[in-house]
Image (cartoon, grey):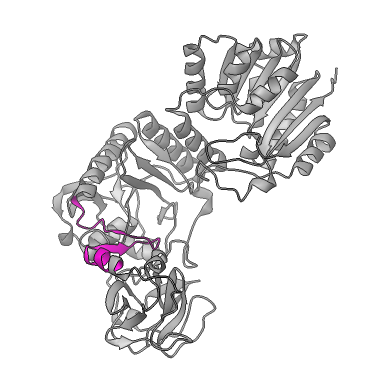
Amino acid sequence: MTNVNVSKRTSISHWLSSGRRESEAEHHPNTGRIAGQVAIDHAGVAEIKEGTISGWIAPESSDREVRISINGLDIATTGAGRSILLNGERAQTGFMFNVKSLWSYLGEGDWLEVRNGSVRLPISTEGMRFQKFGPHASQFEQLRKLIEAGHVFDKFGRLRASISGNVEWQLQVQQLYDAINDVLEKQFHRSAFIVYGTLLGAIREKGFIKNDDDMDVAFLSRYSQPAQVRGEVCDIAQGFLAAGFSVRCPSRRCLKLSRPGTRAHIDLYYTWINQDGSFDISVGYHGTPLISDPDSFSLVRCNVEHLTVLAPRQAEPLLEQLYGPSWRVPDQGFSHTAKTRQLHRQFALTLEQGQRIYWDNYYRDRRCPPASSFAEYVLPRLDPASTIVELGCGNGRDSVFFASAGHTVFGCDMSHGGIAAAQKGATELGVTDCKFFALDISQPDEIDAFFARPELATAIRAPRQLVIYMRFFLHAITEESERTLFSALRRNIPRAYRIVAEFRTDQDSNTVKVHTAEHFRRYIRPADEIARMTREYGLTLESAESGYGFSVYKTEDPHLCRILASAPSRN
């Protein structure tokens, strides 16, 4: 490891840092409310809606704990009156519960109360109890059994078994953490240390937070400039993919790591030291930045229940930065996206970087499937022995199909994993007249270099039909990248050629998708695309049709548009 000093293992309760503890004054509630700074001088439940319960405790109350009970059974607990920093000023919060799945257990005859200590809090417009759960039958006894068995409402409001004390889960996570740290240390000379909820639980709860649902770790980047930090994250993601991990990057601010065939996963965030010496982290923070430097930022080994992990030596100052001055007060409704968050957006991975990680992970272990329905639609509309350039070829299913039918094919995709899968699939099927290349079409220089390849340049000059084939590609790139692409096509292809494209339309935006929405989708209005092609790109429209039934996949029937167009010769 570099830039990290690791001491001998110790119990986490013995290494609280020298960070400043909150004074009593920091716990004195004031009358500021985050949303609009509304003055309050009384306690009560301001709102109950399916999923959340929020309100205030009395300013003079010395008890910070708020409890929800159903039919007299306590089912959830949180803290209230947290002191926060908002726009540089100290403000006070109320309380909020996220109990989204609670309503599915409640029905006729059930009642809900909220208490602060021994005091029942009045519920706006309802009195002291809330009983409007609908006419359906109560499932309270099932709820009671789950609560008594140790189930808790997690941060998303789901009722589930707690990870605290869950030995089986913790042993799986220990193996995953060790494997993650092994890749970081051996390949990148970095180390994985606990942050966010895992660090908060280790210090405040002396274990895992009961309503947490995962493990949070981070590494310290060797860089401080956004582009360099992002590049390092991408390199590390590729290192994990090569090591056999499943790697997801839904927010483009952390890597979700798991092993195929296991349920455990770990969120890997990235941190860096800004040029002014302030510590920073990819998902942001809610307090005053810790001042450090790469040489003094040190880690210690510690135990968190059944796990042995690395943690920052300056744990308490870091927790105050991550959560604000009242991090010791439990808050079941805490959200990292609250208005108090300080976030440097330029450190998030770019859309193209995030998409490459997604598609590399997606294609890595997938075999080349049969041709798409669009490829079968296009094939009889081609001249014999055409030259086809497929943009966004993925694992090569359609490229291999066209090459097998006697066409010369050049497939390209931003995903190196997809290109590797395409080459492997073509080799296994004995298809030789197709070649595959990695290409990021958001970069004009890369497009120019692609078309300057001798084999492609020769094929373009040949007196055969040239086709630019784009299935499920246009909706996977931004409109800016689309314009970059068509400008490059005009610049690099002086002869006549055809465009064939299939893409998701604006009518597909609300349909249920089989695959996660983690990858980018741009839902395109067909009339807008036709206008761009004919007016901006100088194409002549041959045909256009849209509707359902074009590409049914499992339970999904997307609304698609198919366009055939042609570009004139400029020789």
Whether residue 151 appears in magenta in the rendering, the answer is yes
Task: Give the quarter of the figure containing the N terminus.
Answer: top left
Q: How many marks?
A: 0
Give how far across and how far down residue 241 sits, in percent. 39, 32
Instruction: Say above or below: 430 vs 201.
Output: above
Q: On the picture, is 553 further left or further right than 124? A: right
Residue 54 visible from this viewpoint: yes
Q: Is residue 568 magenta?
A: no
Residue at figure coordinates x 41%, y 36% from the top left: 237
Q: Position of residue 190 (x, y in %)?
A: 32, 40
Quadrant housing residue 138: bottom left
Instruction: Using the image as rendered, state which of residue 21 and residue 150 is in the foreground.
Output: 150
Question: Relative to residue 360, is residue 531 depicted above or below?
Answer: below
Residue at image position (33%, 45%) is 265
Residue, x 67% and y 30% (percent of image)?
444
Q: Is residue 285 left or right of residue 75?
A: right
Q: Nearer the viewer, residue 439 or 231?
A: 439
| Left or right of residue 203: residue 29 | right
Residue 93 seen in this snapshot:
no
State the image coordinates of residue 5 (x, y, percent, origin top left).
23, 46
Q: Which residues are magenta?
A: 143-167
* The C terminus lies in quadrant: top right
Asked where in the image residue 442 lies, by quadrant, the reply is: top right
Residue 169 to residue 395: above or below: below
Residue 318 percent coordinates (x, y): 33, 60
Q: Is residue 184 above or below residue 38?
A: above
